[in-house]
Image: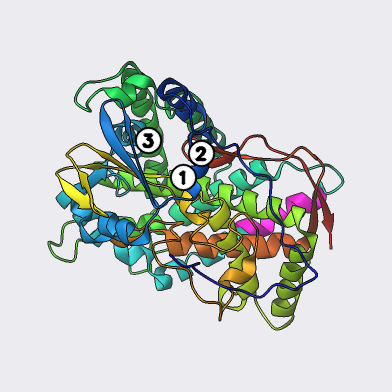
Amino acid sequence: MSIAESYDTPATRKPLVPPSSPRAPEDMTAIGRMAAIRHNVISTWGPRAYQEEIIQGRLLGRSNFIVNQPDAIRHVLVDNYENYTRTPAGFRVLRPVLGQGVLIAEGRAWKHQRRTLAPAFTPRAVATLIPHMIAVIAGTIAQLRDNAARPANLREIMQHMTLEIAGRTMFSFGMERHGPALRDFVMEYGERLARPHFLDLLLPLSWPSPQDFSRARFRKRWTRFVDTLMTERRAAGKKEGAPPRDLFDLLDAARDPESGAAFSEEQLRDEVATMILAGHETTATALFWALYLLALDPTTQEEVAAEVKSVTERGALEVERLAFTRAVVDETLRLYPPAFLIARSAAGPDTIAGLPVHKNDVILISPWLLHRHEKLWRDPEAFVPARFLPGAPPPDRFAYLPFGVGPRICIGAHFALVEATLALASLVGAFRISLVDTRPVTAVGVVTTQPDYSPMFSITPR
């Protein structure tokens, strides 16, 4: 299989190769793999996973396939996607926080949700939300200027910023009162309940695992909290005949184009929860990794700053004019895709790349592996934004999956890219960013691709 892309790099300049995450020994035992899955899925993959197109193995009595072949990925996620559902462990981990939202719904329910939600995430609809994004980003920059003399925890700051953007774009109000509670929910779930235990992987979905009882208790508290947010937003009202001012207006007014059905109150709550959680945490993670890479690569950081200066001298900061900044975002999503793993369970028999697949076999498609695969990318471990500049040959559509692909591609992809590009441009345009901590940061795959610790940064106003 040929390399997916080519690009030009100055001969005198070596591209940055960020710190690598640990790779598993090829002789890792099943027990060792099970223990590692709970703490860092990325650490369970050995060198073969970055070199071979398909690896077949067995775990807990089922065959599993790591798939890195673009044609086979197309078969699973596009051509025969209805035969592949989330794994039981995936449902166990996500349902308590997302309910039956579009991210995990299946069959007819998913199709209804997807059709109904689509108009709220078109580029035109997202454009109406950009002023909310810009206002929050500007507020974050002002706070950073006030505290520029002190080291900054940019991971935490990005989490607060994207949470505020999620709150304002969803409800048109800030998250000053509700933000701490929401962060507590996210931290509690991530630390205690999102990590799969042995029985989560072993038991069929109809048999509750011990963790499922704790997750059910969490869900009761979580849904009450989301109901509170929705009640507060409804109390703010909407002017008769006024255009939608936020995502809540768009979702509340959404109708299935085929049936004309609106979301029920429970469905609306699950969609709101999905958009807030899936949106803010993944974007915060992507922005952290982009800032970390630019701190390690000052030359590329200055290229971003120069582009921002050029654009703002000629008018407003617009995503369409930030080609290099967008390329940095795209390359960050290649090296550190927030959604590092797509796991699917076969609903029935199939054949993938000539290999027989049986019912309940598990298919693993990992953007982390795919984006660093030695047969798909030139310098796969290097940070080279030029891969994604206009005019560069695009990568194979099924070799680059930061938002998935096919019918179930992330519905909020455009929203996330606009937010991340504007935020990164604004931050780098305002500050020179460098690292205070010298210890390398490596990736940990649990729910998202998280850093193993949060380093401190130095920020200097430009």
Residue marked by disc 1? 49
* Residue sitting nearer the eye, 114 or 334: 334
Residue marked by disc 3? 97
The magenta stretch is: 136-146
Of labels 3 and 1, earlier in sequence is: 1
Rendered location of residue 437, percent (x, y) = 80, 39
Q: From this viewpoint, is residue 351 visible?
A: yes
The overriding secondary structure of the stretch rendered in magenta is helix
* Residue sitting nearer the eye, 255 or 380: 380
* Residue type at the position of mark 3: Val
Q: From this viewpoint, is residue 253 visible?
A: no
Numbered badge on residue 46: 2
Q: Are marks 1 and 2 in contact (CB under 8 Å)?
A: yes
Residue at 37%, 35% in the rendered image: 97
Of labels 2 and 3, earlier in sequence is: 2
Q: Nearer the viewer, mark 3 or mark 1?
A: 1
Look at the picture and state if 434 lies above or below 321: above
